[in-house]
Image: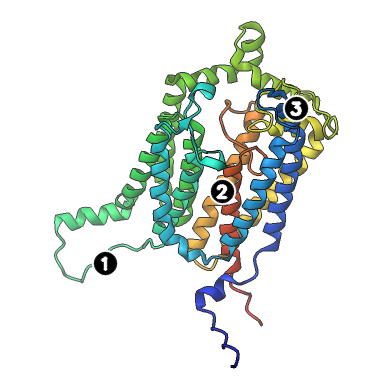
Amino acid sequence: MGKKPKRDLTRSEQLARGPMDLTFLMLVCMLLGIGLIMLLSSSSIAAQYDKAAKYTATHYFTNQLIFGMAGLAIMYLASRINYQSYRILSIVAMVAAYVLLVLVFSPIGYGKATTGAQRWIHVGPLGSLQPSEVAKVAVILYFSARLSKRNDGEIKYPKGRLISPLEEIRGLSRKFGFSELIPYILVLGSVAVLMLLEPHVSGTILVFIGAAAVLFASGIKMYWFVGGGAVAAIGMWFVMNTMAHSSARLAVWKDPWTAYYVDGNDKAYQIVQSLMAVGSGGLMGRGFGQSIQKYNYLPEEQNDFIFAIVCEELGLIGASLIILLFILLILRGYWIALHARDRFGSLVTVGIITLLAAQVFLNIAVITNLIPTTGISLPFFSYGGTALIIQLGEMGIILGVSRQIPAPSQG
């Protein structure tokens, strides 16, 4: 019997098999590699300090390495999927985000006793998951899928036809863009309410940033951002000053040194130790593995405050090089967005990259006390397996978009 003839590839398969952007892939892998190395250094003492768990020095690193390898596999698979599939999957992702956000308040949710906020759920052998991580990417995909079909033109009526008052109102609403914003306002508002009930103010901010990036890139009129930004600022001010969980952080942020050394406020301890770690690194740093703050002085040294250990061990030069890698990754992401095959790919990439940029900026701003302490992790560096897998999956989506960038015409 002869060999079975090979099946011709479909158009969708052909598009998904184009060359991925190697520059973007290289930057992701470099940041992941450096992040794992710095996690090994920053977490080695914390792992051994938990006498009840009897962890080895490499416990956190080993776990993160396993999740990192799984994340790389998921990134590759995501890059091989025709990203047009995410139009339908965005609805599934949005429903999943709502379900997970509600499950936080069920018996499988936890975190209240240790952090004052219930933000995690148990997911069996995977450990724990922050539903906000799913909500961030779900909102971006859902908004991108809807806004990619947006019609910017005004409603046209036949010449000489009488226009009813209802049609006049509809035309004005369309002109000023209010009617089309209603579904997005409802989605964002409902997600924000669920997240603020945890409470998770920083996660809510990130969801808004990702959504705003997609809305802006889609061409929504600027005055809606000015008005929406003002309302959001007032709302955040109200939350920060009325919620005990947030107002306490705000008070510490204003003057952590006085709060801790004069007023005896223990909530200022973490940021004081973070500033000490950053300052003691100097220009060249103490050297890899030579941090003093990781010896049970700085809390969360392997999580949200890992960049303080980076500054202490690698100094200003090392920390600046890592920031430069993040900047290059972000700029390359926007380059992919500008050259994407269609509007959907461009919007998805803009949303994910803007979200990444916001996380990096806000995390570094926290450890330097530029803004009040929040629970925002540093992508590719902070400990957290499911969060790392989701981040690498997002990078895979962008690589999938890069595979379909039209080749330059041959002149």
Q: Nearer the viewer, mark 3 or mark 2?
A: 3
Q: Please state the horizontal and vertical placement of residue 255, each as a whole percent of the image.
A: 62, 16
Considering depth in this image, is 67 or 303 the residue closer to the camera? 67
Q: Which residue is mark 3?
A: 45
| Direction from residue 382 to residue 138 in the image, left or right | left
Residues at circles 3 and 2 in contact by the CB criterion of under 8 Å: no
Indicate the amino acid at tag 2. Answer: Ile
Q: Earlier in the sequence, mark 2 or mark 1?
A: 1
Is the residue marked by circle 2 packed among few (<14), some (14-19), or many (20+) residues within 10 Å?
A: some
Q: Earlier in the sequence, mark 3 or mark 1?
A: 3
Considering depth in this image, is 177 or 121 the residue closer to the camera? 121
Residue 244 visible within the image: yes
Q: Nearer the viewer, mark 3 or mark 1?
A: 3
| Direction from residue 43 to residue 406 in the image, left or right | left
Q: Residue furthest front?
A: 1
Q: Which residue is mark 1?
A: 156
Q: Earlier in the sequence, mark 3 or mark 2?
A: 3
Q: Residue furthest bottom?
A: 1
Is the residue marked by circle 1 packed among few (<14), some (14-19), or many (20+) residues within 10 Å?
A: few
Q: Which residue is mark 2?
A: 390
Q: Please state the horizontal and vertical placement of residue 266, each as a whole percent of the image.
A: 61, 13
Q: Please state the horizontal and vertical placement of residue 187, each as a whole percent of the image.
A: 36, 45
Quadrant of res 340? bottom right
Count of marks, rendered view: 3
Mark linked to residue 388: none
Q: How far apart, in angstroms, are the residues tagged by discs 2 and 1? A: 44 Å
Indicate the amino acid at tag 1. Answer: Lys
Q: Please state the horizontal and vertical placement of residue 296, each as a whole percent of the image.
A: 72, 21
Residues at circles 3 and 1 in contact by the CB criterion of under 8 Å: no
Element assignment for label 1: loop
Q: Residue at x 56, y 70 (%)?
A: 16
The image shows residue 404, relative to residue 56, as above or below, that is below
